[in-house]
Each structure stands twice: as structure tokens, then as C-alpha cells.
Amino acid sequence: MADHEAGELERALRRAVNGDVSFDTASRALMTMDASNYRRVPAGVVAPRDADDVAAVLAVCRERSVPVVARGAGTSIAGQATGLGVVLDFTRHMRGILALDPEARTAVVQPGVILDDLRTAAAAHGLTFGPDPSTHSRCTLGGMIGNNSCGSHSVAWGTTADNVHALDVLTYGGERVRAAQGLDGLPARLRDGMRALAGENLARLRTGFPELPRRISGYALDELLPEKNADVARALTGSEGTLGVLTEATVRLVEAPRARALAVLGYPDESAAAEAAHTLLPYGPLTVEGMAADLVTGASGLPKGGAWLFVEAGGGSREEAYAHAEEIARAAGSATTDHTVVADPAGQRALWRVREDASGTATRMPDGSEAWPGWEDCAVPPARLGPYLRDFRGLLTQHGLRGTPYGHFGDGCIHVRIDFDLLSEAGVRVFRDFSTDLADLVVTHGGSLSGEHGDGLARAELLPRMYGEEMVGLFHRFKDLWDPAGGLNPGVLARPRRLDQDLRFDPLPRRPVDVEFGYPHDGGDFSAAVRRCVGVAKCRNESVSGAGVMCPSYRATGEERHSTRGRARLLHEMLAGEVVRDGWRSQEVHDALDLCLSCKGCRSDCPVGVDMATYKAEFLHHHYEGRVRPAAHYAMGWLPVWLRAGAALRAAPVANALSGVAPLAALAKRAGGIAPERDLPELAREPFTRWWRDRVRTAGPRPDTGRTVVLWPDTFTNYLSPSVGRASVAVLEAAGLRVVVPPKPVCCGLTWVSTGQLDRARVVMRRTLDVMAPALDAGLPVVGLEPSCTAALRTDLPELLGSDPRAARLADSVTTFAQALEDHAPDWSPPVVDRPVVGQTHCHQHAVLGDGAERRLRERAGLTGELSGGCCGLAGNFGFEKGHYDISVSCAEEQLMPSVRAAGEDAEVLADGFSCRTQLGHLTDRPSRHLAEVLAEHLS
């Protein structure tokens, strides 16, 4: 679309629509892709507020012959949520639960309602919505209805089509249609057309559709048969937005079991599990999910075996559910190698997380190479799953491909990511050849090309192989009846585009981009790192679960561009250069990354390990290369230098006094780009390293009676919180360890990394390696106290200095305070504090270092209770920077602040990170301490 046409379309939409109309570069770039291999660039995005807005959009677009694509959470795997023309984003405004009738067991919802929100509302009445894709925490009902989604509980409650009562839709032509059972009440054109289509083809509609629980492909024309009372709602479910735009849905709810238990059955191999799955269906399971060892390498809690079935059972009580699960396990009999039954909800959630993250973890093969969807969810009759999987594995081998199947074994539906080479012409030819061969194989086994995610751009071209040309001709006729102008999601389902067109990899550079970080897990290729994001959108979860972190800025703003996926999409488009055309200078990418807290939560919480903190540092480096930077980059990026200079001049008393003078503090904050709402941190009168030197000079070195450890005097501990360092020395020595401190200043370079000053970061890191060389040669462990600095030594240091072998040695030597005690003083017993705790695990601790040792140390010390998840919101320099204060506080108010305010007076507020302690100090009057300080206080 020409620029002047797009401009006129935007103006017309703004005049007609009350919702949000966005034709800017970033909004368009964010909607180019879903969770598939495909990419199509829209002209603009509209977030309608109601059905009248939708009608207005259709009228404006119809007048100009502009296509319209309805989109939910954008987690579709076949490409149907991408599109040209105008994309309707229902996730912003049209997300209400309009009615819930527990007696009738129905709910009336708008298309943007998130599935988990509906399930939460229904749970208050002992009900649930049966279909539950693994994306249940962010997928929308509109998207589920468009795709006829299923999920793991379909063996009990069926597909979305089985749970739809009525749909209110708008056609591209502007007709408002109430689709339910029966043709009465429909516009005469549609009523007569569907009656004729069905009446003229009764035999074909009765015999032309395979009988299996997961037949999702094509249009469900058999639902128009008279014996099914012409169920138009079911016929529209799964039509992928090609027939009408959903504005409201009445869905059925089912009774939820009061208790559930999970039987995990181990089998020798995948074939044995596949052969057994359908034999368990007569016992009434809620799920029969399967996966093999090549997908869950390293997962804990699984019984021995080479493949597993996750079989969930329900009951009126935990005991009843457990007995039901045990009955199923016994029925599985000698075919299993082992089994376990878990009735504890937390234990079940941990096991289910392995399954739900599979769509992300499967995108990387064991050797780190990429794998992609495209043949993600074929389905066959459950009794034929074993033979089908063997043939499928053989076909992979024939084409020189690899994949890790998993999925809904009880329904005969298999998910798989395959290591297609979609970056070369030869690789795309293999992709196409394999796709056609697999389509034939699925049909041979009596299956469906799609068993859950729809046909979209990935499979619709091959529908004639499944249904034959005559049936596909009826599909085209059905499309033309509902959408004669072809304005709704063109190229999908009817008259489809080729499956090897519109691939999202096509515009990407074919040679590695010149970058600073090493990206060791992506072969040094920044494009490959960005490609990690496949769009499953776990980062769009609107609440954090357990100890999770990702993605605090999205939860604070609710905007796609501030999610990990959104930022990855913008970086992808920056590399592509078609929509985002300014490369590293892009203001759109900069603005999206500006609210990234660099918490690194995505590094661990994202199923595919996207590390947006690193990508942000990389981008800022190039964005400001050769240009003046924001004041905060000089003030806080160079913080170690300013603090060291202040300590050398012994200026802390004067600086602290001046910062207490409001006009002077305001002037300093304005000059440094610091948020006016923040208090300047107080400088320590005696840095930790000065205290240490004085201690050694007066008392001499400790006797060499135990393991020597190097205590890392990070910038924050040294100059701002030396009490943490002193307490750590006391505890480590009490545990029998000999503590030494580097003889010269050292720094991890974190502040330069987080502000993208990577050249300077390297200089600082190399100087640090020179100082640390003797300790590395001696094989001494290095104990970090500040989680962010410790994580920087583990990750940023070796990824920026990959050519220096000392970097990897230092990274391998680094340990946390609790890990050092556990590894090097295993027989030491900590003092028993015997108090409840509250606080937060530092984001970098969660994402990079892990907190298992800290949990165990707290338990041994009698510090009871769990620390909250999420992010404190300060996140180093982020919360101090001007313009970030409100987002910073919003992040803190999500979990940390409420938990601290609710804690009793006797609760110890723990925060190992200086940022966390600072945020707590700014927002609450409760003092917080490092774990080392708490333990040191109770040493005898």
C-alpha cells in the first residue's frame, strides 16, 4: 500500500473509530508475525472498543478494498494471525466477561478475554472452560475460536467447537450475524446459501471428513448437515477469521473436578508410550499427554523411562483423585517401566510446566541448532498413533531432518519442531518436499493435517491432498458465501498462498551482523539470537507465578512493545530493514528497549532463553556509537569511577551533607539524568576495602586453616553498603574459611554493560582479569555478594571477552555467598535465627545464578517462608533514570511491596541486592538486609 493510501486510510479510521488507531512503524512491526514461520506486514492496527468499532473498521476497509485480519494474543503457529491491511487487536479493550450463568453453565465473552481470566471467574462456581492450550495464561477466546483450539484436556472436554454455543460475528460486508444451531434468523443470503450447499452435497459431507477427535483442518462443513441441526456456530469455529469477525461468544462451561492427581507413566520408548495411550481412555482420564526423553533432558521428578505419559485424573477429593490415578497406573500394567502419582498441587504444577514449556524448549535441538514449527500438530486416529510416529520418524530421516515429537497422545495429536533450514533456497525446498510427503503420510493413516492449531499459511495449500479437489471446491464456495469480496484474512484456508511464501526469515541478513557480545549459544550470530523468539508469548503473562520474573515492564504497561516478544519482534524488523528502516539508530527500537529493566528474567523464564538484557546492551552500544549519550549513562554508567574518586578524596561526609540540601540535590539529579522522585544514595564513610586493609594491617592475615576464598568487593558493597561485606567476612570466617580480598580495585563492568558502553566495559573487565590472574591460577573460588555483579561475572564477562581464556576461568570460579558456604564449608551449621522472612529473590539471582543454595541456607538457619517473585523495579540504573519512576514503582507494587506491608513485625526483610534494598528503603519504612547481615548478627 502506497504511503498516501495508508495515510488516507488512517485518517478515515480515526474519524470512524473510538478505539486506538495505530499506523506508526512500531505498531506495524509488532504485528508482522505470530508464533509461526510466517511474516506479513500490515498497513495498520486498530484496537476496537466494541462491536460498533469493528463494524466501522470493516466499513472503512470495505470501501477501499483493504483486507482485515482479526488477532488475539498472536500465538498462532500456522501464520493465520499475520496479515496484510488492517489488523484488529482485541487484547486491549474487548476483553470483558459480559455474563456468567452457573446454572446454565454458560459464559458470554468478548473475543479478547484471556482464557485464564475466564477460568478464574468460572472456578468461583466450580466450573471451567474445558479446552486449555499450553498458552492458557495469555491466549484469547477469540483466537481459540478462530483456530478451534484444544489443549491437553480435550480427551475429557473436547475442542473449542465442542464448547461453543453461539457466536456473534460481523461479515466483511457489514452483516451482523448470530450463529448458533439452525439456519433460522440468519440473513436470507447466508441461510439460503448454506442450505443449498449442504442439501446439494449431503453424501460428500457425510463421508468426506475423517472420523477422529482432532480433525481441525479445513472448514467444518459437515456441521451444516440436517442431522446436526445445521450448527453454524460450530461450522464457523476454526475458520481462522476468514468468514466473519467475532465480536461476542456464548461458550459452555463444564464442572471442574474438586481435586486432581497426576500419574506420570514411564515407558521404554516413544513407540511404547504411543501404543499405550489410547488404551487408557476407557478409564476416564482428563489428559493423556506424551513426550520422549529427547525433549525433557534434565527434567527432574520423572520416573525412569525413555518416554512418558502424563495422565491426569479427577475426583471429589484428593484421596479420590489419587485413587483414580493409581487405578490408571495399574491399568497401564507391565508396559510401563516405572510410574509416579502426584496429588500435591505444587508438584503437579512443576511437572506440567515441563509440558507447557515444550513448545519453546523444542525450538532448540540438543546440539543448540534451531528447530521450527510448520508441521506442528498433525493428528491421526489415536489407535494408529504408534505406527504413525514410527513412519513419521522414518520420514524425518529420509529428508535428513530431526525433530522432537510430543503432545496429545490420547487424541492422536503430535506437536513437533523440526530443524528445517529456512534460510537457504535448498533448505526451503526440503521444507516443501517434506511437507507434501508428510501430508500424504497423515492421510494414509486416516488423519488430519491440523489437529489443533489450524491450517493458516502452513498447511492450507495441501488441503486437496486430505480432502480432494471437490471438497476443497466446497470450501471455496463456503468462503465466497460469507466473504464474497475476499476481504477477511485472504490467503488463509480458501485459495491459500504457497506454504513456502511469506517466510519470516526471508528479509533477514544472511551473514552474521557485526556485534560486540559473543552469543555463544547462537553461534555468535545476533540474528540467530533474535530468532530465538518464536512468539509463544509467555512474556505476556499478566501475573507472575511463583518465583518467576519475566516480564515486569509488560505487566506494568500491558503494551506488546514492552514485552520480551515485542522487543524481539522490533529487533527482527530492524534487521529485516523493511518496516524499521533506521537500523541501530531506530528510535522505535530504542523506545521499546527503554523500559526493559535488564532484569534478565527472560533468560531463565522464556522457554527459548531469549536474553533481552544482553540484546538491549548490544543495541545501546550501536545506537549511541559516535554520539552524545543521555546524562544517566555518564552519571550511572560510570558510577564505579565516581565512587572510587569520592572514596579517594574521602568526600563521603561532604557529598552526603550536600545531597541533603534539596536545591543542590535537585540540581545534581537534573544534571545526572536521575529521577527527581529518587533520593540520592548515601555514600559509606568507610568503604569495605579500606576497612579490610585496616583490619589486615592491625590484626594480620587469618591463619591458613581452611579453604581460601576470594571475596569480591563489588562497587555497591564497597562504597554504598560495606556492612554487607563486613558481615560476610564474619560469617565466612566463622564457617572456617580463609577470606582474602583482591589487592587492587576490581569491577565486573556491569554499569557500563547495562548502559551499552561495551568498549569501556571491556577495558574494565580486562583490568580486572589482570588483578585476578593469581587467584585464578591458584584455583580459588570467588564469592560474590551482589547478585547483579556476580551474574555479570558469570555471563557478561565471558560473552564480551570470549577470546580471553581467563574470562571463562573467572566465570567458572564465581559462586554466591550461600553456594560458597554449602560447597566449601559443608559441615558448618549456621546460627539459628528462627524468624519468618519476607522479601524478594534478586532478578539476576533467579535468572542466572539460581537460589537453591540460598533457600537451603535460610532453611538451616530457621528463616521460614518464601520470598516473592517478580522484580523490585529499581533494577540498577533503571529505576533511577528520569522518566522510569512510575514503572519502577508499579513493578515493586506487584508483589514485593504488598508482601512486605503484610508481613508481621517479627519478619526479617531479606534483600541480597542493593537495588532491592534501595527500593524498599524508598517505598517502605521497613529496613531490609542481606542474608549475610542477618546471619552475622546471630553469630555467637
Image (tube, rainbow, N blue to C red):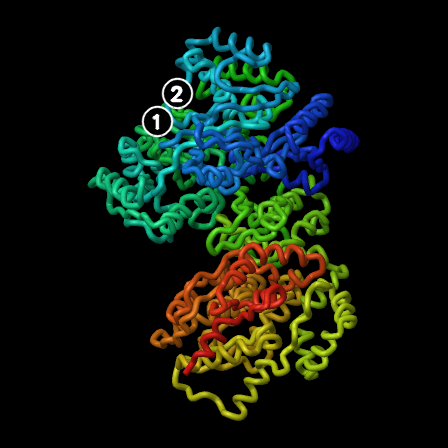
Q: Residue at x 57, y 58 (%)?
A: 599
- Label 2 and label 1: CA atoms lie apart by 9 Å
- Residue 819 visible (yes or no): yes
Q: Is residue 622 left or right of residue 822?
A: right
- Residue 463 visible (yes or no): no
Q: Is residue 656 left or right of residue 210?
A: right
Residue 601, placed above or below residue 32: below
Whichever of callouts 2 and 1 sits on the residue coming sooner in the sequence is 2
Q: Which residue position is annotated with label 1? A: 381
Judged from the image, the secondary structure of the residue bearing numbered disc 2 is: loop
Instruction: Rate crowding at label 2 as few (under 14), some (14 to 19) or many (20 or more) other CA atoms within 10 Å.
Output: some
Locate residue 880, reporting x and y percent: 67, 63
Locate residue 831, reporting x and y percent: 40, 76
Q: Are marks 2 and 1 in contact (CB under 8 Å)?
A: yes
Say how many tags the image has. Answer: 2
Locate residue 201, reporting x and y percent: 46, 9
The furthest residue to the left: 334
Judged from the image, the secondary structure of the residue bearing numbered disc 1 is: loop
Look at label 2 and name its amino acid: Pro
Q: In the image shown, does 396 or 199 lie closer to the viewer? A: 199
Q: Residue at x 35, y 53 (%)?
A: 300
Q: Which residue position is annotated with label 2? A: 210
Q: Residue at x 67, y 38 (%)?
A: 28
Look at label 1 and name its amino acid: Pro
